[in-house]
Image (cartoon, grey):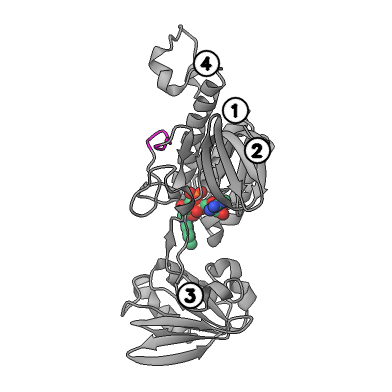
């Protein structure tokens, strides 16, 4: 093993799945490091969650803060960085971030999904300089200003609804002829008088020197320039799993194939939450998967340390009457 900070388990991602996994592993007294770009992930993008058990209504930020506090209380350590690569060695895994390397016996992948880029000229350069992927997070920065929103689905609809109470005007650009979200409620966007609609249109470039100044829209064969100070790209989320390519099996969408007990195709690597192939992407589901992956990781780490039987040895364990020691997990 190289001279690196060593842990029992490293969790990549600090949101519903990763934070729940951290609560479980640290409570089981595994040395746990969570490496994450932020705390909360996608849940930060909504200011109201109404379907997380135990809370009639809670903001994503508040819920995720509670998760983190609980994990930290049990001893989980947090590092705010991006994981760039993971490699296997003789006694575990080396996890490289932008700055350092860390070592662990087991790794739990919980890095969820990331907003999809528009992929047009100017976008990369102006990210964080007027180009945003989260209306709820960044909307207040554009109070009283004119902005644009790209997208036609629920996410775009929610962004426009929220922004209509904050900004002065919204240029809404979408490729389909009609919004695919919002149903009859789209009328209220029209009635607000704040939304300029560009249906069957697309943004072809984002312009500005140091910050967004305008967007170029292709609409009905015409090219139109709209002056805006911000652009919210609200066109869905993708799995950015290129950095683990070849390490674990993924599907055509880049989602990690995981088993019912959170195992991946590589022994010692576990996965949970939105980054896996599960069909329903929800906070409570990610949290449940985080718990499962953590318990599997615990069994794995214990068996590597020669301290207890792993779940795969389950059948060979002779459980005496009244002895539930091995059943707790
Ligand atoms: C607008 C919106 C509203 C929603 N509303 C609800 C709702 O009401 N109820 C509900 O149950 N669900 C809701 N969801 C879905 C829910 O937010 C997700 O299912 C949940 O957040 C998934 O959690 P996760 O931990 O799997 O991944 P994510 O939330 O995607 O988090 C991934 C984490 O990994 C980190 N990360 C990513 N790549 C790296 C890397 N390379 N290195 C280090 N860290 C990395 C990110 O910073 C983040 O912390 C909503 C989602 C959105 C976008």
Instruction: Name which of mark 2 and mark 3 comes first in the sequence.
Output: 2
Q: Residues within 10 Å of mark 2 (few under 14, many from 20)?
A: many
* Spatial CA span between label 4 and label 2: 24 Å
Question: For mark 2, what is the residue?
Answer: 76
Q: Is residue 98 left or right of residue 55?
A: right
Which SS class for mark 1? loop
> Mostly what secondary structure, the magenta segment?
loop
* Spatial CA span between label 1 and label 2: 11 Å
Q: Which mark is residue 325?
A: 4
Q: Residues within 10 Å of mark 1 (few under 14, many from 20)?
A: some
Dividing the picture into quarters, in which one does residue 18 lie?
top right
* Residue located 42% across and 18% down the image: 313
Question: For mark 3, what is the residue?
Answer: 160
Image position of 222 with respect to 190: above or below: below
Question: For mark 1, what is the residue?
Answer: 28
- Start-end of magenta stretch: 259-265
Q: Position of residue 269 (x, y in %)?
A: 48, 36
Image position of 269 with respect to 284: above or below: above
Which SS class for mark 4? helix
Q: Is residue 238 left or right of residue 79?
A: left
Q: Quadrant of the N terminus?
A: top right
């Amino acid at each position: 093993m190289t001279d690196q900070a060593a842990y029992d388990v490293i969790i990549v991602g600090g949101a519903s799945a990763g934070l729940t996994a951290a609560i479980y592993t640290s409570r089981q007294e595994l040395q746990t490091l969570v490496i994450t770009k932020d705390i909360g992930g996608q849940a930060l993008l909504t200011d109201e969650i109404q379907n997380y058990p135990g809370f009639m209504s809670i903001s994503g930020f508040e819920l995720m803060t509670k998760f983190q506090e609980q994990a930290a209380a049990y001893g989980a350590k947090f590092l705010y960085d991006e994981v760039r690569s993971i490699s296997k060695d003789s006694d575990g895994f080396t996890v490289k971030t932008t700055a350092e390397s860390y070592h662990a016996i087991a790794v739990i992948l919980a890095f969820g999904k990331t907003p999809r880029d528009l992929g047009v000229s100017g976008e990369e350069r102006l990210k964080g300089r007027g180009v945003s992927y989260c209306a709820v997070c960044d909307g207040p920065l554009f109070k009283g200003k004119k902005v644009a929103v790209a997208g036609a689905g629920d996410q775009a609809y929610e962004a426009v609804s929220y922004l209509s109470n904050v900004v002065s005007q919204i240029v809404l650009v979408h490729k389909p002829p009609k919004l695919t979200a919002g149903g009859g409620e789209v009328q209220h966007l029209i009635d607000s008088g704040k939304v300029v609609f560009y249906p069957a249109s697309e943004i072809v470039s984002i312009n500005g020197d140091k910050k967004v100044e305008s967007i170029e829209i292709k609409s009905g064969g015409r090219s139109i320039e709209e002056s805006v100070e911000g652009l919210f790209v609200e066109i869905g989320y993708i799995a950015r799993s290129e950095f683990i390519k070849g390490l674990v099996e993924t599907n055509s969408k880049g989602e990690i194939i995981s088993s019912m007990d959170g195992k991946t195709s590589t022994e010692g690597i576990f996965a949970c939450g939105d980054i896996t192939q599960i069909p329903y992407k929800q906070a409570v589901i990610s949290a449940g998967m985080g718990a499962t992956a953590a318990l599997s990781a615990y069994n794995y780490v214990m068996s590597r340390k020669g301290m207890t039987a792993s779940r795969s040895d389950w059948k060979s364990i002779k459980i005496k009457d009244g002895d539930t020691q091995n059943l707790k997990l």
